[in-house]
Amino acid sequence: MQRGLLLKQDSFRLYDVDFNTNNRQNNFIHVTSMYDTFLINFCAKNDSTVRYFASRNHVMGFTYRLTDSGYRGFRGMYFMQI
């Protein structure tokens, strides 16, 4: 099942990605902004690299597929400037 979010956020930090890389069609995250595409169907196994993304228009989009059983998916934090 594919899920999507469109948030009024200034930046996003992605970390701890754990997808089944043998099933990339159903295990990924896609990060966009109105003007930029940051990640396209990103899929990695046990990747703890921290990735930061910032929006020029304060709106970010996230699309992801639910991960296969036994994998964590991903964790991230959203930041909004006040």
Image: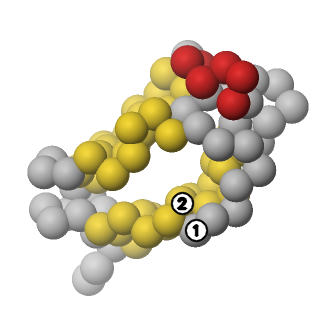
Q: Position of residue 78 (x, y in %)?
A: 45, 65
Q: CA distance from mark 1 to mark 2?
A: 6 Å
Q: Position of residue 72 (x, y in %)?
A: 76, 42
Query: Which residue is found at the position 65% from the left and 43% from the top?
Result: 44
From the image, tell me which residue sits under label 1: 50
Tell me which numbered mark, 1 or 2, is placed earlier along the sequence.
Answer: 2
Judged left or right of residue 49, residue 14 is: left
Judged left or right of residue 68, residue 55 is: left
Judged left or right of residue 62, residue 13 is: right
- Asked if 76 appears above or below 81 in the picture, the reply is above
Instruction: Tell me if I can see residue 7 in this picture.
Output: no
Q: Position of residue 18 (x, y in %)?
A: 72, 44
Q: Nearer the viewer, residue 48 or 3?
A: 48
- Asked if 34 appears above or below 67 in the picture, the reply is below
Residue flagged by tag 2: what amino acid is it?
Leu
Element under label 2? Answer: strand
Query: Which residue is found at the position 30% from the left and 68% from the top?
Result: 54
